[in-house]
Amino acid sequence: MLMKLLLSPVMGPINGVVWIAEKIQERTNTEFDDQENLHKKLLNLQLSFDLGEIGEEEFEEQEEEILLQIQALEEEKASLEQEEYLNEEEEDLIEEPQFNNISTPTIAEEDKTLVLSR
């Protein structure tokens, strides 16, 4: 318990990063599984139609539903990728230094005199 308490400032951020990575992995697997399942449904639907188990109208209705679901998943994935890209761009931007408030050096009157000696 004491060791865990002492290491929490170091291990806390690391555990947080690990947790976030696990959540991203779960989300990726879920999205992949969803898309894979929709493609399998579409394949089964095509097979059922080819074998004459369902009619053309029913096939077209179900096919349209599945294709719309696939399209929605792809659009969601694209918007998430674009959002991630924009977030990375914002993080990568470095604020440029502002030179508006910098004043030019002035020369005092004493410095302007030239002393010649022999």
Image: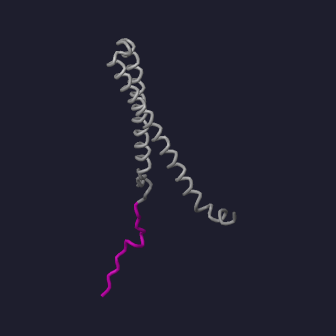
Identify the colour scheme used: one colour
Question: Where is 66 relative to 34, above or below?
Answer: above
Residue 54 drawn at (x, y percent): 38, 15
Residue 59 drawn at (x, y percent): 37, 16
Front residue of 42 and 103: 42
Q: Quadrant of the C terminus?
A: bottom left
Quarter of the image where one finds residue 65? top left
Residue situated furthest right in the rendering? 1
Quarter of the image where one finds residue 66? top left
Q: Quadrant of the N terminus?
A: bottom right
Residue 114 is one of the magenta-drawn residues: yes
Prevailing SS of the magenta stretch: loop
Front residue of 67 and 83: 67
State the residue at coordinates (44%, 44%).
87
Question: Where is 30 relative to 117, above or below?
Answer: above
Residue situated furthest left in the rendering? 118
Front residue of 107 and 86: 86
- Number of marks in picture: 0
Residue 64 is one of the magenta-drawn residues: no
Residue 89 drawn at (x, y percent): 40, 46
Residue 20 drawn at (x, y percent): 52, 48
**Magenta stretch in the rendered image:** 104-118
Front residue of 26 and 86: 26
State the residue at coordinates (41%, 26%).
41
Question: Where is 36 relative to 17, above or below?
Answer: above
